Amino acid sequence: MGTVRPIHEHIRSGTYRDDRHGDKIVLPPADLVEPKWTDLLPGSSAEAKRTRKDAAELWSRTAPVLSLAAGLTDAQRETLAMFCVSVANYWAVTREISRTGNLLKGRTGELVKNPLHTVRTMYVNEITALRKELGLSPATAARITRPATSSGGDSDDIWD
């Protein structure tokens, strides 16, 4: 037997069926509540403020789309918040690499790779995984369809 897909994946991909999935837990729709960015990204420096602004802007662009297209609810907002924080931090690290350079002088004066490249790679891996989880990668987004309903009405019928 294959792996069991979560119910929200069936809803997002359009394969939801009452006879198969009716007894599963389905999260009711609830508006996504934006996190308090000062709690997640504390600091008073100009870079910290810019990182909070970047995360908030990404949330404002992404949350409404995911709420409508993928049925993301407030119970799942942590994944989206992690995505926004990771992308904002990725941009901050990239800006710092741009300021300090790709190569730095080591202890003995030789040129070494900027250690921030390792940090940036960690963010890239985290962002890639979260994009797939949220259905934001191009391949995943191409598979998302609005669920079909038997009543021919709006897709919100599955919440009734």
Image (cartoon, helix red, strand yellow):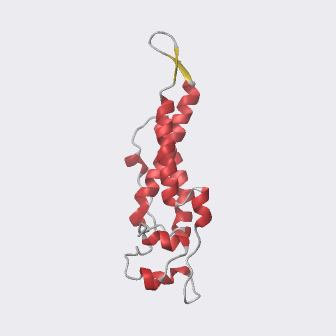
Which residue of the protein is positioned furthest toward the top in this rendering? 108
In the image, residue 72 above or below residue 80: below
Q: Residue at x 48, y 42 (%)?
A: 123
Could you say which is closer to the camera, residue 111 or residue 40? 111
Residue 62 located left or right of residue 77 = right
Q: Residue at x 55, y 21 (%)?
A: 103
Could you say which is closer to the camera, residue 6 or residue 159? 6
Could you say which is closer to the camera, residue 44 or residue 12? 12
Q: Name which quarter of the figure residue 2 lies in.
A: bottom left
Quadrant of image for the N terminus? bottom left
Q: Position of residue 12 (x, y in %)?
A: 52, 70
Quadrant of image for the C terminus? bottom left
Q: Name which quarter of the figure residue 159 lies in.
A: bottom left
Residue 89 located left or right of residue 153 = left
Q: Position of residue 49 (x, y in %)?
A: 48, 41
Which residue of the protein is positioned furthest toward the bottom in this rendering? 151
